[in-house]
Amino acid sequence: MHGAGNDFLVVDQRKGEQEVLAPENIRRLADRRTGVGFDQLMWIGPPRDADSLAYYRVFNADGSEVEQCGNGVRCVAWVISRDPGQKSDFTLGSPAGPVPVRILGENSVAACMGRPELEPAKVPFIADRRAAVYPLQAGEDALSVSVLAMGNPHCVLQVDRVADADIQTLGPLIETHERFPSGTNVGFMAIRNRSQIDLRVHERGVGETMACGTGACAAVVAGRVLGKLDEDVEVNLPGGQLMVSWPGESAAVWLSGNAELSYEGILDL
């Protein structure tokens, strides 16, 4: 499946006995030349509490497990929405906590991504105090960045044009920067106007992807904290558009966009 070009292998094991794949098998399947090819593996298992219909886990293409994936959860929601008699509003469980979702149309899904975490220690990010922007030295570049968590860590840089952003150099440098103890996703944002931005994202453990749902949320939150964006923002990514809505710091962020089935089948491992 994919959401705005951010592609996934979605495995539904709600009724199966299969254990989560070993990292080496995830890496093998993620290879775009010799495997299936995907940015993340979304592993759906049975619910772990009475309020959720299922519990999902997220694995990057390098085999590492991460906390959250905004486009991936919308694909998981789409899979579950095909169950007979399934209502359009329901909740999923995840390592980042409960995620309410809403089926908006045949291939359109919204997900509540929770409240952003702006305290640096909880991102985690090493800083003396909370700030709207932080200085960050990446190689020879002295940068000003926004830092927050959307269930997973994010660093957002504002640029004039995303096409000119040096993602291939800065992305890996910032992802593994010593001030991010758990690593980080890195977003490069250009603001068109108060309701529209362009964005490219270097994802932790993956590299640049066609889209990143939590990255879109993080970019909008960063722009809102700086007073540069309105509550509802269209995020233009290389793979398509996502919509992000965030009223303010005490509220949750909602992410909406497409969730598309590319193909389905059976893997014999």
Image (cartoon, rainbow, N blue to C red):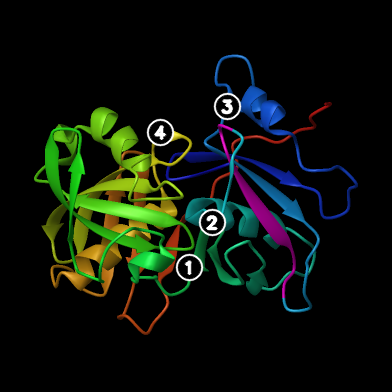
Report helix, strand or loop for mark 4. Answer: strand
Residues packed near mark 3 inside 10 Å, few (<14), some (14 to 19) or many (20 plus): some
Of the residues shown, which amino acid type is indicated by label 3?
Gly
Q: Residue at x 55, y 57 (%)?
A: 74
Front: mark 3 or 4: 4
State the residue position of label 2.
68
Q: Amino acid at mark 4?
A: Gly
Secondary element under disc 3, as helix, strand or loop, is loop
Look at mark 4 in the image and give the residue it sits on.
207
Judge left or right: residue 131 versus residue 3.
left
Residue linked to disc 3: 37
Dot 3 and dot 1 residues touching (CB under 8 Å): no
Mark 3 vs 1, N-terminal side: 3
Which residue does the image show at 49% across and 66% down from the upper left?
110
How far, Cα to Cα, is label 1 from label 4?
A: 22 Å
- Horizontal side of 106 relative to 199 (left or right) equals right
Mark 1 and mark 2 in contact (Cβ < 8 Å)?
A: yes
Residue 53 drawn in magenta:
yes
Marks 4 and 1: in contact by CB < 8 Å? Answer: no
**Marks 2/1: CA–CA distance:** 9 Å
Residues at marks 3 and 4 touching, judged by CB atoms closer than 8 Å = no
Badge 2 marks a residue whose secondary structure is: loop
